[in-house]
Each structure stands twice: as structure tokens, then as C-alpha cells.
């Protein structure tokens, strides 16, 4: 069965390359453009196998979304990888402390390396 | 003579009664207060019945009251013992057995009160009554000795475990007992033996009891004002006062009594004592203070202590203020010390209080604030100024002397005695207030000198702490800025990196290839424009803005912005109303900079307007301000609006409103900062108004024609 990934990201220029490479690797994708949209998708009981989460998002920021995911007993076991360009130690620590499985700074990875890293969590 | 002594006793017992009631009323709920009431009531019963016995018209009544008088001491020693189990702190309740033993004996004694085992016979004399005590008196004596022994033992045990202020409370009670013994010995032993007068032996013990109960009452009621020095001071003053008055009293009666009769001598003695009491008391206070109490601190010592304390603590405003308050409490022994510190809003807010926080605030128009703003070095001492005002000679070397009565009134209302301005770098940054000294003394010259020194130090420390906090805040803002900027630059860069990686790989279809190239191009433009903004913003702080003026029109700029944001405008279905006067198309301005202004205001309006029913209106008009002609341009939207605190910071570098961050997370917080700088560089002004959240905002700027 195909694995299903939820991408929570507002920037279309980031979504597009991710979409192309991940679907080429055979993943099913769903995209939420803001925090509230992501929560809505998760409330539809359409649980993904992995969540890629940006931090700077409209309406509700990534940390809040993560908190929500980890509070809900039905979603708290889904691995969440933070994919952000906030790159300071404090921000990374905060993300991991809130229960993220990993924290990747976008510019630090080629898109191919990123996909390999993501696959480790599936 | 007899009647006078009896009446004095009755007056004393009335005083006692009042005291007992006062203590109970002060706190009805506390058991100590209730028990103290019981102790006082039994004392009152004792004194009243024995003085009624003295005042009796015949021996039957004298016997009746004398027999009744024994109830008082029985219950007095029982209730006092009981009281010591709970004093100074309400402890656990006493076992029923102990209570029964303590009160059993007095209750049993009640049976023997009306019998000959109490008093068999009373004889009336001129100076009072004499009686033959029965067996009950031996019981009373045993009771008094054992109960008081146990009570003192209780107090001693508690004294060892007590903290400092409870120690002082217990000390009061000890002091009271010692005073009673002293006075009792004086009136009932020394006077009768050496001066052969038994007259005071009737009133002496009552007086002693009054002093003892007053001290205990003081300890209970004013317990948070306790201070061992004050106790000793009061004890010393009152003992000396009592000794001197007794000496005068006995002397006058002894010298004059044989010539003019004892009653007249008594009247003269009483009159003399009444007239000389106040000056005598003040004299004794003055002398005792000079000898024992006034010089118990040395300026240098205090300043050394302050410096060492302050050097030990970190540069934290609250901790420093606490240290100062501690010093004030220790050396001036004031009931209250309070510091008001200037806030950025221009008001003085209560910062650190010794006892309790009242959350007071003094506005910039408060007379105290206004007064100290014009008299930055003046110490406002309520006692001194109050005396001057009373004497009607208010010639102080101050500015705004008209404010002095108002300051006086304000300080009385706040219950402070001394106020000192705290300044730093010629600005009033705080006011330090002190309440009354617990001893009731005025502030001495030395006190005020020390206080002056203290506030100088406080001023310097507050200033340092503030500078340090400002630096810290600036540092935070800087690191926050670096974080935001790196994020904003990384985002388009990562998109560009991934797009080109996929393009280089060549395994994507033609349409996507084209899209990626478009995205990369747009991202590079985004980065260029943001880098420009950053450089402009950095320059604004550093140097004057250079204007390169040409002729151009606003209409073109608006069209360009709308074209570049076409997609978003269509998505949100925004409506535009543009209504410009002809003049707006032919302005002599720095075209690049004014285009930037239009770009910022218009993209803000587009970004923060609601989808589907958003309306953006741009209009202009000619205005005359102070004989100069301006064009005024207003950009109005019905978007998220600007509320509360945001209004204060909206034009500050890197500031972004909370709602704005949610709607458009990628902004830098530089747009409006740049707008303000560019408009002002042209000699114009930018303002805004907003009716509230989701009620839209209107930005208006003017440019000189």
C-alpha cells in the first residue's frame, strides 16, 4: 500500500519541487496551506503516515500545529518532521521538545538527500 | 483620702476595661485576643471589688466586697496561665485535662468565697480596709505562685523557639512582669518601710497592673511593629517617668501634708503632676534617646553595608530595590518604605513596598511629581513642613511653593512622612517614600543626610539597571532580526536550490520546467527587493536621506503595483476605488522613493484585506498647513486594522502586528518604517487611523507642493 504524507507549507515555490519528487518516489500527498487547514484535514480522520511541517505559517504557526497533533491521542503517534528555515538552536530545540521526530533546515539539504532522510521515518 | 484612692482604682479599672475591649475588638477571631480579654476582665473584677470594699459605708458591705475580691485573682492567674499556652501564636488546643486542672481550682474556690474560710472579719480604717485572711488566701497564694511560675516557664520555653518578632512580643510580657514587681516593691515595700507611708500601697499594684496589661496589649495589637529597641525604650521611659512622678507625689504630700492637710496636698500634687507630665515625658524621652538609642548607627557603616550588599546582587532592578528597603527598615525603623519608579508611559508606579503592595500610581500631573520635577534635590519632610505651615511661615527655598500644601495633603493621604526625589542624569526617575518611624520620633538631621545619600545611590543603580536592560532588549531585537532575516532569505533560496536541482536532473516535463524557471526568477526578485529594503533601513538609521527629485505621477505607480499583484487581487476579488486629483500626476519628488511608499501602502492594503468583500480606496486632495501647500494621499482598506499596543510601534523597525504575521508571515517589518522615513525626508507627514480589529485602516501621507 502506498504511504501517505501530509505537507503543511504555505509557500508554493517550496511545495512544487517537494510535490514532484515525493510523488515520483511513489508517495500519496495531501497539502495544507496553513495551520488551520492542516488541523481540519487531521480532523477528517484521514490520518497520514508522516507529516512534513513548516513553522512560519498563516493563521496558526507550526509549533501550535505540532502541539495540537501531539495532544490528540489519535494523531500523536504520527511522526512529524519539521521542515523549516528557522535555523537557530533555540527554535530547533523547541521543535524537538514539542515532539517532532526530526528538524530539517530546508537550505541545508539537497532535495534528493531530503527525500532519503524522510524515507527513514516511513 | 480614702475616697480618692478608691476612685483612682476605679478609674484604672475603667481604663483596663477599655483596653481589654479594644484588644478584643481589634481581632475578635483570634483566640489570643479573647483570652487576653478574659485576663483583663478578671483583673478588673479584682480591682473593682477591692476598691468598692475600701469605699464601703459599713463593715457588712466591706466584708461583702472584700470576700468577692478574691474571685478576681483566682481567675486572673488561671486565665493568664491559659493565655501563655497560646501566646504569642495560637497553638494547638490544650488538652481537656489540663484545662480542667487550670480552671478547676478557681471554680472550687468559688464555693468558699462567701464563707469565713475566705475572710472572717473586716475592719474599716481611714486609709482603707484591713482583714483577717482565712485558709482560702493560702490557697490563693499557692495558686498565684505555681500558676505564675508555670506561666513564666511557658513563656521562657516559647521565647527560646520563637522567631525574632515573637521573641519581642514575649519580651513585652516579661518586661511587664518585671515592671509590676518593681513598682509593687516600690509602693508596697520601699515606701512603707523607709517613708512610713502605706498610702500608695493601695493604688500602686493597680497602677502596676495597668502598665503591665498595656504593654501586653501593645504586644498583641501592634505585633508587626514590634522591635526590641522600642520595647526597651518605652520600658525605660515609663519606668523613669513613674519613679520621678512617684517621688514628686510622695515628696509633695509628705512636705505639705502636715501644713495644709493631706487632701489639699494630694490635690496640689495631682495638679503639679498633670501640668508637668507632658514636658517631663518629653524631657525623659529626649535624654534616654540621646543616651541609649539615637546613635545606634554610623553613616559610614551603613554606606559600607549598602555597597557590599549591592555588589553581591546581580543588576536586577527589583533585587536592588529590595536591598534598599531592607536598609531603610533596619536603620530608620520605619513602618513603611515605598519606591515609585518612572515607567515609559510617564507615570510613577509603586515598585517595591516593605509591607504590602497597594498598586498605586502617580500620574505626571500629580502634585508630588510636578513638585519634584522642579525641585530635584529637595527632601519633603512632612513633620518639618507641617510645623512651618502651622506657624504660617512657609518660606522654603523651593520652586513652585504654591504646590507645597497640595504635596502635603497628597502625602498625608498616602500615609508617608518623608519623600525624596530619585534622579539620574538630571531626570526625575523615581520617588522614595518613608512612613513614620516606629518609635514615633521625627527624622533626625543624620537620618536625612543618610537618606539623601541613599537616594543618590538608588538613582545611579536604577539608571544602571535600566541601561543594562535596554542593552539586553536591543541585543534581543538584533538576534531576533538576524533570525527573521536569515529565515526570509533562506526560504526563496531553498526553493531555488531544489528547483534547479530538479531542472538539472532533466527528468521533469516541459511545463514544470517552465514553471520552475519562473519561480526561480520571482524568488530572485523577491530577494533583491528584500535586500534593498534592508539596506535602506540600515541607511535610514545612519545617514541623511538623499533626495533625487524629478517630475512623475502617482497614477503610474499605482498601476504598476496593481499589475504586479494582479494574481492576488483576482484571487481575493478585491475592489479598487482610485480617485486622484490632477495635481497628483505631476509632482516634483524623488520618484523612486515615492514609488516605494505607494508600493508598501498598497501591498499592505491588498495583503491585509479580506477576500471577497475587500475594498481598497485611494484618494488625494490639496491641503494648506501653516500657509504651505501640500498634497494629501490616503490609502484606505477594510482589512484587519491596527489595535492597542500595535499603534505605538507600527512605524518601528522590524515591528509586525500579531494578526499581520498570521495573514502574511513572510514580511520583514520594514515597509512602514521606510515609508515614514521617506515621507519625512520630503518634508511631509504620515499618519494612520483604525477603528479597531477587522475595521480597516487608513494611512495618510502629505507631500509639500
Image (tube, grey):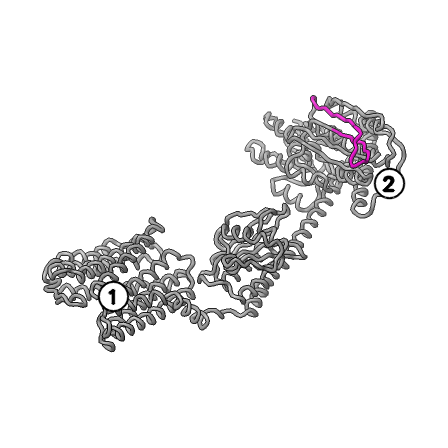
Residue B467 among those drawn in magenta: no
Within-10-Å neighbours for mark 2: few <14, some 14–19, many 20+? some
B79 vs B382, left or right, is: left
Farthest residue to the right: give it. Answer: B550
Q: In this picture, is A29 found above or below B137?
A: above
Residue B619 among those drawn in magenta: yes
Identify the residue shown where x is 51% and y is 63%: B443
Q: Secondary structure at mark 1?
A: helix
Q: Dot 2 corresponds to which residue?
A: B547
Q: In this picture, is A34 found above or below B143?
A: above
Identify the residue shown where x is 33% and y is 71%: B243
Predominant secondary structure, magenta span:
strand
Asked whether residue B156 appears in the rendered view, the answer is no
Within-10-Å neighbours for mark 1: few <14, some 14–19, many 20+? many
User: What's the chain of the residue with tag 1?
Assistant: B
Q: Which mark sits nearer the N-terminus, 1 or 2? A: 1
Residue B153 sits in which quadrant? bottom left
Q: Dot 1 corresponds to which residue?
A: B203
Residue A79 in the image: state x and y as whole percent: 62, 36
Q: Which residues are magenta?
A: B612-635
Asked whether residue B579 appears in the rendered view, the answer is yes
Amino acid at each position: 500500500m502506498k504511504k501517505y504524507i501530509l505537507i503543511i507549507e504555505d509557500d508554493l515555490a517550496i511545495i512544487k519541487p517537494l510535490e514532484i519528487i515525493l510523488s515520483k518516489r511513489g508517495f500519496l500527498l495531501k497539502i495544507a496551506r496553513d495551520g488551520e487547514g492542516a488541523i481540519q484535514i487531521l480532523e477528517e480522520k484521514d490520518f497520514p503516515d508522516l507529516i512534513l511541517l513548516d513553522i512560519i505559517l498563516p493563521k496558526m504557526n507550526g509549533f501550535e500545529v505540532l502541539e495540537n497533533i501531539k495532544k490528540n491521542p489519535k494523531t500523536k503517534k504520527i511522526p512529524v518532521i519539521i521542515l523549516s528555515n528557522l535555523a537557530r538552536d533555540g527554535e530547533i530545540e523547541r521543535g524537538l521538545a514539542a515532539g517532532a521526530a526530526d528538524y530539517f533546515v530546508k537550505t541545508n539539504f539537497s532535495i534528493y538527500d531530503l527525500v532519503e532522510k524522510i524515507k527513514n521515518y516511513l | 483620702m480614702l475616697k480618692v484612692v478608691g476612685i483612682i482604682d476605679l478609674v484604672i479599672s475603667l481604663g483596663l476595661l477599655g483596653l481589654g475591649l479594644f484588644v478584643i475588638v481589634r481581632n475578635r477571631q483570634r483566640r489570643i485576643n479573647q483570652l487576653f480579654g478574659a485576663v483583663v476582665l478578671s483583673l478588673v473584677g479584682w480591682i473593682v471589688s477591692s476598691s468598692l470594699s475600701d469605699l464601703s459605708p459599713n463593715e457588712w458591705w466591706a466584708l461583702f466586697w472584700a470576700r468577692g475580691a478574691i474571685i478576681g485573682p483566682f481567675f486572673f492567674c488561671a486565665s493568664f496561665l491559659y493565655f501563655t499556652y497560646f501566646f504569642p501564636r495560637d497553638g494547638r488546643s490544650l488538652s481537656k485535662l489540663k484545662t480542667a486542672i487550670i480552671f478547676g481550682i478557681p471554680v472550687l474556690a468559688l464555693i468558699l468565697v462567701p464563707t469565713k474560710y475566705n475572710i472572717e472579719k473586716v475592719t474599716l480604717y481611714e486609709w482603707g480596709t484591713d482583714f483577717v485572711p482565712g485558709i482560702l488566701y493560702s490557697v490563693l497564694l499557692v495558686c498565684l505562685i505555681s500558676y505564675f511560675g508555670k506561666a513564666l516557664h511557658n513563656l521562657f520555653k516559647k521565647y527560646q523557639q520563637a522567631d525574632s518578632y515573637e521573641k519581642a512580643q514575649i519580651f513585652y510580657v516579661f518586661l511587664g512582669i518585671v515592671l509590676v514587681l518593681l513598682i509593687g516593691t516600690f509602693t508596697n515595700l520601699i515606701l512603707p518601710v523607709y517613708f512610713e507611708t502605706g498610702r500608695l500601697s493601695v493604688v500602686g499594684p493597680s497602677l502596676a497592673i495597668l502598665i503591665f496589661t498595656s504593654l501586653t496589649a501593645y504586644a498583641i495589637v501592634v505585633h508587626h511593629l514590634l522591635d526590641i529597641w522600642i520595647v526597651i525604650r518605652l520600658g525605660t521611659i515609663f519606668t523613669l517617668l513613674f519613679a520621678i512622678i512617684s517621688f514628686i507625689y510622695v515628696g509633695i504630700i509628705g512636705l505639705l501634708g502636715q501644713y495644709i492637710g493631706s487632701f489639699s496636698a494630694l490635690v496640689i500634687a495631682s495638679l503639679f503632676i498633670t501640668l508637668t507630665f507632658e514636658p517631663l515625658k518629653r524631657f525623659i524621652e529626649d535624654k534616654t534617646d540621646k543616651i541609649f538609642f539615637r546613635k545606634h548607627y554610623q553613616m559610614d557603616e551603613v554606606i559600607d553595608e549598602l555597597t557590599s550588599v549591592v555588589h553581591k546582587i546581580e543588576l536586577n532592578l527589583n533585587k536592588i530595590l529590595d536591598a534598599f528597603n531592607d536598609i531603610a527598615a533596619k536603620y530608620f525603623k520605619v513602618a513603611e518604605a515605598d519606591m515609585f519608579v518612572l515607567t515609559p508611559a510617564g507615570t510613577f508606579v509603586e515598585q517595591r513596598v516593605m509591607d504590602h503592595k497597594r498598586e498605586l500610581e502617580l500620574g505626571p500631573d500629580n502634585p508630588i511629581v510636578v513638585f519634584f520635577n522642579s525641585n530635584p534635590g529637595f527632601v519633603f519632610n512632612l513633620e518639618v513642613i507641617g510645623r512651618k505651615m502651622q506657624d504660617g511661615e512657609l518660606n522654603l527655598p523651593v520652586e513652585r511653593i504654591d504646590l507645597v500644601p497640595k504635596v502635603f495633603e497628597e502625602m498625608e493621604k498616602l500615609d508617608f512622612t518623608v519623600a525624596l526625589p530619585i534622579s539620574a542624569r538630571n531626570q526625575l526617575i523615581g520617588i522614595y517614600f518613608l512612613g513614620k518611624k516606629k518609635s514615633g520620633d521625627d527624622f533626625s538631621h543624620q537620618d536625612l543626610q543618610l537618606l539623601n545619600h541613599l537616594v543618590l545611590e538608588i538613582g545611579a543603580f536604577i539608571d544602571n539597571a535600566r541601561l543594562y536592560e535596554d542593552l539586553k532588549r536591543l541585543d534581543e531585537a538584533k538576534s531576533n532580526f538576524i533570525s527573521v532575516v536569515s529565515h526570509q532569505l533562506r526560504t526563496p533560496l531553498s526553493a531555488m536550490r531544489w528547483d534547479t536541482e530538479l531542472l538539472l536532473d532533466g527528468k521533469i516535463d516541459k511545463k514544470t520546467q517552465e514553471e520552475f524557471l519562473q519561480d526561480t526568477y520571482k524568488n530572485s526578485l523577491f530577494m533583491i527587493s528584500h535586500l534593498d529594503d534592508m539596506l535602506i533601513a540600515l541607511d535610514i538609521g545612519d545617514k541623511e536621506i538623499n533626495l533625487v527629485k524629478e517630475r512623475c505621477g502617482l497614477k503610474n505607480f499605482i498601476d504598476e503595483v496593481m499589475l504586479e499583484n494582479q494574481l492576488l487581487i483576482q484571487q481575493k476579488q478585491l475592489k479598487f476605488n482610485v480617485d486622484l486629483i490632477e495635481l497628483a500626476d505631476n509632482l516634483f519628488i524623488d520618484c523612486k522613493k515615492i514609488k516605494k511608499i505607494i508600493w508598501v501602502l498598497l501591498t499592505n492594503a491588498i495583503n491585509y484585506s479580506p477576500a471577497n468583500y475587500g475594498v481598497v480606496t485611494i484618494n488625494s486632495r490639496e491641503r494648506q498647513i501653516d500657509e504651505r501647500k501640500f498634497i494629501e494621499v490616503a490609502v484606505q482598506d477594510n482589512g484587519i486594522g491596527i489595535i492597542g499596543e500595535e499603534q505605538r510601534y507600527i512605524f518601528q523597525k522590524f515591528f509586525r502586528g500579531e494578526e499581520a504575521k498570521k495573514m502574511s508571515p513572510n514580511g520583514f517589518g520594514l515597509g512602514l518604517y521606510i515609508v515614514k522615513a521617506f515621507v519625512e525626508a520630503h518634508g511631509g507627514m504620515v499618519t494612520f487611523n483604525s477603528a479597531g480589529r477587522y475595521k480597516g485602516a487608513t494611512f495618510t501621507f502629505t507631500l509639500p507642493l
